[in-house]
Image (cartoon, rainbow, N blue to C red):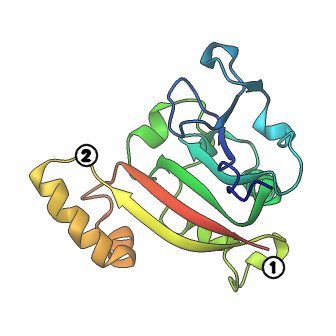
Amino acid sequence: MNDAPAAPRALNIGCGTADQIPGAVRLDLARTARPHLVADLDEGLPFRDAAFDTVGAYDVVEHVADLVALVREVHRVLRPGGTFLVTTPHFSSANAFTDPTHRRALALRSFDYFLAGHPLGVSVGVEFRKRRASVFFRGKLLDRLVALLARRFPDWWEHRLVWIFPAWFLYFDLEAVK
């Protein structure tokens, strides 16, 4: 009998050409990205329920037609306690609007809608627990100082200073609650 744990099962949706999750199943719409599987995220995920421990979506959620439907699908294919890792341009970033294929720009609280207990989340039908939501800046000295301020007082920064000190991108680490 083999008591060794199974290898982590990971999926990288909208993988592009980068290898953000080594060993993950790579899914993309573009054949040029050389994914393991060519599929359209707007058509759902072609995997069984609870098939993955981790789903990564790096710079892809801003491209989908229906973000709520994608999050439901990710939740479906994650095992209980599985992680959903997301990066996306912050709404104050020029990157959020320079790509004509972006359909939305997101904020630090954009995934709060999917959290257990959110007042509007009951209509979504899935729940996550937020393990981390972080904002990142370009890296100059002033940006590093603003990053400290924004991480300490995220609502204040996003509501009052975001257009003076715009961010670069967001990172979310969400745990599937089932």
Residue 50: x %, y % from top left: 82, 57
Residue displayed at 40% across by 50% down: 169
Question: Residue 172, relative to residue 153: is it above or below?
Answer: above
Dots 2 and 1: beta carbons under 8 Å?
A: no
Q: Residues within 10 Å of mark 2 (few under 14, many from 20)?
A: some
The residue beneath circle 1 is 122
Q: In which quarter of the image is the C terminus?
A: bottom right
Residue 39, picture quadrant: top right
Q: How many marks?
A: 2
The residue beneath circle 2 is 138
Question: Which residue sits furthest front?
Answer: 1
* Pointer 2 or 1: first along the chain: 1
Residue 24: x %, y % from top left: 63, 38
Closer to us: 73 or 88: 73
Residue 87: x %, y % from top left: 50, 49
Element class at badge 1: helix
Element class at badge 2: loop
Residue displayed at 68% across by 82% down: 118
Residue 14's disc is none
Question: Which residue sits furthest left?
Answer: 141
Q: Quadrant of the N terminus?
A: bottom right
Question: Residue 31, relative to residue 111: is it above or below?
Answer: above
Left or right: where does residue 40 sit relative to residue 96? right
Residue 171: x %, y % from top left: 46, 56
For badge 1, the amino acid type reads Val
Residue displayed at 73% across by 79% down: 120
How far apart are the two marked residues, 2 and 1, measured between alpha carbons?
36 Å
Residue displayed at 46% across by 66% down: 133
For badge 2, the amino acid type reads Arg
Q: Residues within 10 Å of mark 1 (few under 14, many from 20)?
A: some
